[in-house]
Amino acid sequence: MTTKMSLSVLSICATLAACSTVTPLTQAGRNVQIQPPNSALLPSCTTLGPVAATGSRFFDPENAGRDARNRLREVAAALGADSIVLLSEQIADLLTRPRVTLRGVALRCYGEKTR
């Protein structure tokens, strides 16, 4: 294998690896919980607003979903939320690049209330 060909293969592998990583969570994002819609906790929560996020990964539908959830938790954290209730999950199978879109409501259920 020539040096030029080896570099091309390494470049392709690096590109695919970069596209397959999942969005990392910050500490604030890790503190956001996804609550079930029938959670007994919800009546005591303050609604902060709608949130949505999309994740997609080459050849990897499982990590596309994980990426969307991490992105959604980060969006909610930016609003000051500690919880999310998912309202919808849309999965688009785009051959080699599956895409997952999540929509929900950001909530503050613990700590100081802003009602």
Image (spheres, rainbow, N blue to C red):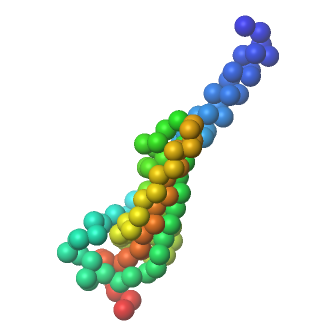
Q: Position of residue 109 (x, y in %)?
A: 31, 77
Q: Position of residue 5 (x, y in %)?
A: 76, 15
Residue located farthest toward the left when viewing the structure as drawn: 40
Q: Residue at x 74, y 21 (%)?
A: 7
Q: Is residue 90 above or below residue 38?
A: above
Q: Residue at x 27, y 77 (%)?
A: 42
Q: Is residue 43 above or below residue 106?
A: below
Apparent side of residue 36 relative to residue 96 in the rendered image (left or right): left
Q: Quadrant of the N terminus?
A: top right
Q: Is residue 84 above or below residue 111?
A: above
Q: Quadrant of the C terminus?
A: bottom left
Residue 4 image-quadrant placement = top right
Apparent side of residue 115 relative to residue 7 in the rendered image (left or right): left
Q: Position of residue 45 (x, y in %)?
A: 31, 81
Residue 104 image-quadrant placement = bottom left
Apparent side of residue 44 relative to residue 17 in the rendered image (left or right): left
Apparent side of residue 3 relative to residue 97 in the rendered image (left or right): right
Seen from the viewer's position, the closer of residues 8 and 104 is 104
Residue located farthest toward the bottom when viewing the structure as drawn: 115
Task: Count up the numbered dots.
Answer: 0
Q: Is residue 59 visible?
A: yes
Q: Residue at x 62, y 34 (%)?
A: 16
Q: Is residue 29 visible?
A: no
Residue located farthest toward the top when viewing the structure as drawn: 1
Q: Residue at x 46, y 66 (%)?
A: 103
Residue 114 image-quadrant placement = bottom left
